[in-house]
Every structure is written in C-alpha cells, then in structure tokens.
C-alpha cells in the first residue's frame, strides 16, 4: 500500500521546524531550532532571519532523519497563521518555493488547530477540551458545529510570556518557564497574588505586576515562583473546568510549550478526575511548536480534498482558531 | 431528601425538599489539586460574594433566587429552587420571536446590573433559567462584582458575545443583535462606550 508523505513547515514565532509525517500517522522525523534572544522578547525580524538562515538545513536534516529524498514528498504543508508577520512570510516563501520546485501541492495550516490535532493523534482522543498554553497563547478550545471554538483565553498576556517576562525581571535566562518550575519546588511560603478569572477568560497582567512587587520587597525568588505557579495554574484549571462543565466533553488535552510543566499537568489531572474525564498531556516533542503537527494537519486537510494555490496563499497573522472550517471532522 | 442535579465547574448543586418546598443547596467542594490557601480563599470569597450579589442584583430589579442561608464553614448556600430549564437547552426549541424576546430580556437584565455598577462575571446561557411562566432568572453570581468600571462591563459583554459564538454559533448573529438591543435600549447613551470597549477587548488577547 502506498503511503502519502507530507513535509510540514512551522515558523509562526521564534521556532522553525520541519516534520515529515505519513498519512497513517507515523512521525518519521521532527527537527526544529528555537531562537534564544540575548535579552528581551521576540524580535520578529530577527526571528524571521533565523528561519531563513537555518530553515534549509533544518529541512535537510528532517529528510535525512526520515530516510527520504525530496522526490518522495507528496505535498507541503505550512503554518499560515496566526503568528508574527515576518516569520510567517519567510516560512510561507520556503513552502511555496519547494512546492513549485518539486511540483507538489501546497496546504495551508492553522497553527492552533494543528496543536490540537497532533495531540489527538498521540492520545487517540476524539473530541477533547484542549488547554493550549505557550509563549504566545493561552486558550481553552473545543470542537462544536464544524469549527474549533475558543471558549476561553487570556484577556492580556499569555502564560508563557508572563513566565518569561517575570523570569527576566528575576534575572533568569530565556526561556524562564523551566527555571521557574525548578525553583518553585524549593518555595515554602505562599504569597497571595491577584487571581483573575472572568467567565472562561483569565488575565495575568495584574498577577505579573504583583509578583514583580514581591521581588522588589525582597521576597525570596523560590517563594515568588511557587506563588506564581500555584496562582497562574489554578486560574487555568478553573477555566478548563468551566469549559468541561459547559461542553460536557469527556476528554481533556494539555498541549503547547507550557504543557511541559509537571505541576500544571498534576493540577489538570486533578481536574479530570473531579469531572471523570480522560486526560492526556502531549509529549514534549509534539507539544511545542514543531513541523510534525503542521504535516499531520496538512494530511488531514489533503485527505479531505483541500489544497491551496500559491496565488491564494498569503499569510494570516491574525487567523483565529474558529475561522477555519474543520472539513475533515465534518 | 437530597438530590444531585448538577456538577458545575465550581460546585455541586443539590435539590432538597424542606417544609414542602424545593430549595437548591449549592456546595463549593474542596479541590485537592489546588494549593490549599487558594482553594479555601476561593471557596470563601465566592460563597460570600454569590450570597451578597444575588441580593444586590434583586434590588437592582433582576430576577434571582432568594437566599435563605449561607454556611461559611462548609461553603454552602441555600436558595430558591427555580423550576425551569436552562436557557442554553431551550434555545433550539424556540421560535424566532420567542428567542428574540428572551435575548432582549437577557440584555435588559445585564443593563440593569450595569446601571447599578454591577457585573455578573459569567453571563453564559447556562446561567439563565426560564421558568414555566416564561420568566428569565439570572443565577451563578460567584464571579459578580460591584463598583464595576467600563472595562469590567466591557468584559461582561465580551463574555456574552463569546458564549453566543461558541455555544449558539448557528444563531449567534440574531441572538447577539437582540441581546445588544435589549441592553442598549435600557442603558441609553452609556451603552456606546461599553460596546466599543467590548470590541476592543475582543481583539486584545489575540496573538500579535
Ligand atoms: N436556584 C436554582 N434553581 C434551579 N436550578 C439551579 C439553581 N441554581 C443552579 N441550578 C442548576 O445548576 C447548574 C449549575 O449551577 P451554577 O451555575 O450556580 O453552578 P456553578 O458551579 O457555579 O456552575 P459553572 O459551571 O457555571 O461555574 C445551573 O446551570 C442550573 O441548571
Ligand atoms: Fe504554538
Ligand atoms: Mg453556572
């Protein structure tokens, strides 16, 4: 039996990734590199430079690891949005060039949707409530009426961004998330921080300001990390619970870069027990931004009959999760 | 007699019969997966807030269950049982005019709260009950707040918009239109600022 092979390119923010996936759901390779800014947040131009400099060799590595040649690729999928304009454009240009050169179809993929579907592939979940937490996103998403709908999200900054900004303030390197997690384990005193849940939305900016203030008051860093984690993850647990109670779905999926956090995982596992639903945390190699998820979503779309002409493939930096018809689930 | 009728995000809801009458007992259970101080703080503040705001809302002219007892050791509230159906479950069974009518009423109720500088905090169609006389009741005031600013009111409207688009996607335009009309008609000129804040909030959290 012939299998279809898809090359997926991810490049919505500071990571560039290339993944090779077959239509039976095997991930043959998944290579990526993340730009670590010397200081400060992501600089869109710098990140897009990173993608164009390293992209070709990352793609070559992916092919080599998968043990295939360029001619074995049946089609190309790319992250069309949402994300940073310059990064998206660089990635799209690589995808279009390859599609022309190899004379294979092009498929445009929504980054957030791809996070969910690769999680479903790994967990075999059919219809989860998904908590997608990363540097740029904090969303609770579920499928309803032909679309993935955002039931809740942050009203200001994303959880990953909040942790990184705090980390910078506390003198940590980038990304700060893993360091915060490690230090939080040594924290002993809890300091109350603003807990801000609004319906199924939440807000982290007040908590961030208050946490910085604790630092200026000389509170030990481990205690700050501990307090921040418990508060921030508690809020996420609450909006996940609201989405489960509201949608009555039977599965809870945790994905995105911040899914690597064990304390967050433990809390959401507790949520799943209370509501008697299944739980899965996407494994680290598939939870962050990478090309395999783009390739897999490309396969789902391709098999449902969707490809895109190069002339129609302009990037969509503000492409919302609920703007795409999920034809392969209909 | 105690009968479990709902498992909410925050609480367990029982219907109990006493003195030949039905009541609701809303119990905020402990959540062992949360840090204990946060857990007890949330249980306490949400319980006392809900109790207070159910009454505040009623004085502003919004139909809410009357509260009979609060227990801040066990975090329970005893209130009226509203015999009826969640609006969310009723939507698909209504005629266009009935649906518009309830949405107008929903918008007016939110406007009454906002006029009194109160926000509901979780204005979804799960938190509306339609009784046998077709009257609309607002419940679930655990996230409700007083001294609301334009920002807080804008968030309240944003949450309504969100609830309609995620849960009633096929009817969201007409439902939103009627809800906003009910809201604006009863709030008058102040509605403009809050509506434009709603739009602004909608754009904010997005990736950019
Ligand atoms: N006073 C009442 N009379 C009748 N039914 C009620 C009453 N209060 C609650 N219910 C039912 O129980 C459900 C859950 O109640 P409520 O929304 O107060 O709990 P919650 O835990 O705060 O829920 P959420 O999941 O929205 O956070 C309601 O949607 C409604 O169906
Ligand atoms: Fe992502
Ligand atoms: Mg409720």
Image (cartoon, grey):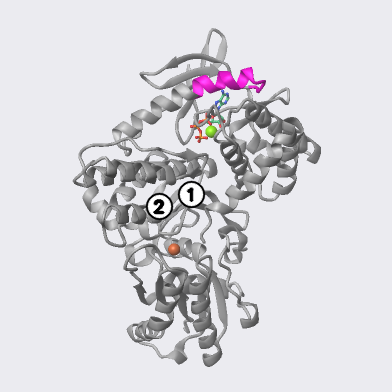
The residue that appears at 57% across and 60% down in the rendered structure is A320
Question: Are the residues flagged by discs 1 and 2 in contact, CB closer than 8 Å?
Answer: yes
Reading the image, the residue beneath label 1 is A154
In-image side of A28 versus B166 (left or right): left
Residue A50 at x, y percent in the picture:
40, 77
Q: What is the magenta segment's predominant secondary structure?
A: helix
Q: Is mark 1 within 8 Å of ligand 2?
A: no
The residue that appears at 49% across and 79% down in the rendered structure is A90
Residue A292 at x, y percent in the picture:
42, 72
Residue A158 at x, y percent in the picture:
44, 53
The residue most toward the front is: A216
Bounds of the magenta span? Answer: B50-63
- B123 or A269, nearer to the observer: B123
Residue A220 at x, y percent in the picture:
21, 43
Task: Say whether residue A67 is magenta.
Answer: no
Q: Which chain letter matches label 1?
A: A
Quadrant hosting residue A304: bottom right
Reading the image, the residue beneath label 2 is A159
Q: Which chain letter matches label 2?
A: A
């Amino acid at each position: 039996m012939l299998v279809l092979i898809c090359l997926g390119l991810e490049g919505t923010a500071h990571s560039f990734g290339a993944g090779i996936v077959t239509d039976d759901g095997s991930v043959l390779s998944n290579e990526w590199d993340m730009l670590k800014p010397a200081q400060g947040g992501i600089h869109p131009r710098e990140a897009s430079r990173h993608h164009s400099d390293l992209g070709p060799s990352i793609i070559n590595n992916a092919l080599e690891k998968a043990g295939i040649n360029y001619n074995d690729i049946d089609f190309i999928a790319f992250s069309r949005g949402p994300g940073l304009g310059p990064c998206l454009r660089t990635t799209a240009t690589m995808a279009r060039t390859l599609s022309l050169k190899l004379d294979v179809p092009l498929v445009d993929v929504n980054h957030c949707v791809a996070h969910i579907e690769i999680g479903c592939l790994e967990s075999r979940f059919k219809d989860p409530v998904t908590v997608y937490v990363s540097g740029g996103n904090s969303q609770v998403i579920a499928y309803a009426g032909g679309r993935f709908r955002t039931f809740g999200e942050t009203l200001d900054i994303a959880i990953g961004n909040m942790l990184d900004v705090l980390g910078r303030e506390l003198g940590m390197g980038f990304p700060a998330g893993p360091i915060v997690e490690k230090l939080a384990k040594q924290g002993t005193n809890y300091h109350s921080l603003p807990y801000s849940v609004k319906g199924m939305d939440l807000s982290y900016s007040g908590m961030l300001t208050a946490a910085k203030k604790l630092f200026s008051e000389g509170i030990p860093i481990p205690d700050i990390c501990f307090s921040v984690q418990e508060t921030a993850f508690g809020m996420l647990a609450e909006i996940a619970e609201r989405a489960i109670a509201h949608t009555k779905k039977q599965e809870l999926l945790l994905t995105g870069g911040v899914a690597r956090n064990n304390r967050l995982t433990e809390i959401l596992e507790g949520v799943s027990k209370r509501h008697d639903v299944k739980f899965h945390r996407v494994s680290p190699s598939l939870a962050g931004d990478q090309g395999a998820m783009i390739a897999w979503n490309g396969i789902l779309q391709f098999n449902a009959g969707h490809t895109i002409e190069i002339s129609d493939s302009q990037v969509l930096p503000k492409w919302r999760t609920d703007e795409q018809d999920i034809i392969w689930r209909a | 007699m105690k009968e479990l009728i709902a498992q909410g995000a925050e609480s367990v809801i029982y219907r109990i019969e006493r003195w030949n009458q039905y009541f609701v007992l809303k119990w905020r259970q402990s959540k062992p997966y949360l840090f204990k101080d946060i857990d007890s703080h949330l249980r306490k503040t949400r319980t006392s807030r809900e109790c207070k705001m159910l009454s505040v809302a009623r004085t502003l002219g919004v139909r809410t269950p009357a509260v009979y007892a609060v227990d801040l050791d066990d975090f329970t509230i005893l209130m009226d049982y509203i015999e009826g159906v969640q609006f969310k479950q009723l939507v698909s069974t209504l005629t266009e005019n009935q649906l518009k009518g309830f949405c107008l009423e929903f918008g007016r109720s939110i406007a009454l709260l906002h006029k009194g500088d109160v926000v509901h905090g979780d204005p979804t169609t799960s938190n509306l009950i339609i009784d046998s006389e077709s009257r609309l009741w607002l419940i679930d005031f655990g996230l409700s707040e007083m001294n609301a600013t334009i920002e807080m009111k804008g968030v309240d409207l944003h949450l309504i918009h969100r609830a309609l688009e995620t849960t009633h996607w096929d009817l969201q335009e007409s439902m939103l239109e009627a809800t906003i009309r009910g809201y604006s008609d009863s709030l008058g000129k102040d509605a403009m600022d809050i509506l434009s804040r709603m739009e602004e909030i909608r754009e904010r959290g997005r990736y950019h």
